[in-house]
Image (cartoon, rainbow, N blue to C red):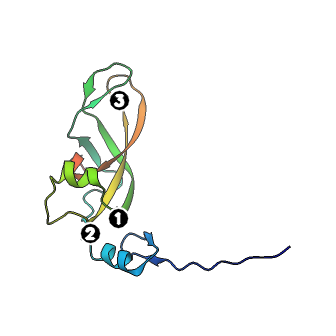
Amino acid sequence: MKKVVQTRILYVCSKCRTKYSNKKDAARCEKRTREKETFRVGDAVQNIEPRTCQMRQKNYIFSGRIAKIFGPKPSDYEYEVKWLGGKTERVNGHVFQYEIEFNCPRCGEKRQELYYAPELRVIRR
């Protein structure tokens, strides 16, 4: 049996650890701004935009706790357009995503969902 070894060079952004196949893309990613971490694990938060319970078909605002923080990672199209309104000073930045644990107030189901900072507000720390 013949062993084939293939070498591949990747460039890594020092802020988000995203891997790129060329140096130019990695350098562009590193130049992006970095969002400040708004919340901490354990903070009690509430969502701003109402959700819909799939069991009861009713809207609700949940209260929950931050379980995990992911990031920083490059922002995506939804984040920039919906939550920042396409503002040029923060477009194409590195952002954090927060995993929220909460119970649906309509059906009582335990949920875990990912949210960005502009979608949440602190109830208490």
Q: Name the residue under label 2.
A: 34
Between discs 3 and 2, the one toward the N terminus: 2
Instruction: State the image coordinates of residue 10 (x, y, percent, origin top left).
Output: 50, 77
Instruction: Name above or below for residue 8 compared with residue 114.
Output: below
The residue carrying mark 3 is 104
Residue type pointed to by label 3: Cys
Q: Could you say where residue 5 lies in the image, as x and y percent from the top left?
A: 70, 78
Which of the two discs, 2 and 1, labels the residue nearer the N terminus? 2
Query: What's the residue type where badge 2 is placed?
Result: Arg
Mark 3, secondary structure of its residue: loop
Graded by Cα atoms within 10 Å as few (under 14), some (14 to 19) or many (20 or more), the crowding at tag 2 reads some
Seen from the viewer's position, the closer of residues 119 and 103 is 119
Q: Position of residue 73 (x, y in %)?
A: 36, 63
User: Measured from the top left, where is residue 97 in percent x and y?
Assistant: 34, 54
Secondary element at image label 1 = strand
Q: Do the residues labelled 2 and 1 touch (CB within 8 Å)?
A: yes
Circle count: 3
Judge depth for marks 3 and 1 and give the one in front: 1
Q: Nearer the N terminus, badge 3 or badge 1?
A: 1
Disc number placed over residue 19 in the picture, else none: none
Task: Pick the residue in front: 86 or 104.
Answer: 86
Label 3, label 2: how far apart the Cα atoms are: 32 Å
Q: Which of 113 and 81 is in front in this view?
A: 81
Q: Can residue 121 be seen in this view?
A: no
In front here: 40 or 21?
21
Q: Residue at x 26, y 45 (%)?
A: 45
Quarter containing the N terminus: bottom right
Residue appearing at x 39%, y 75% in the figure: 13
Extreme right residue here? 1
Q: Name the residue under label 1.
A: 72
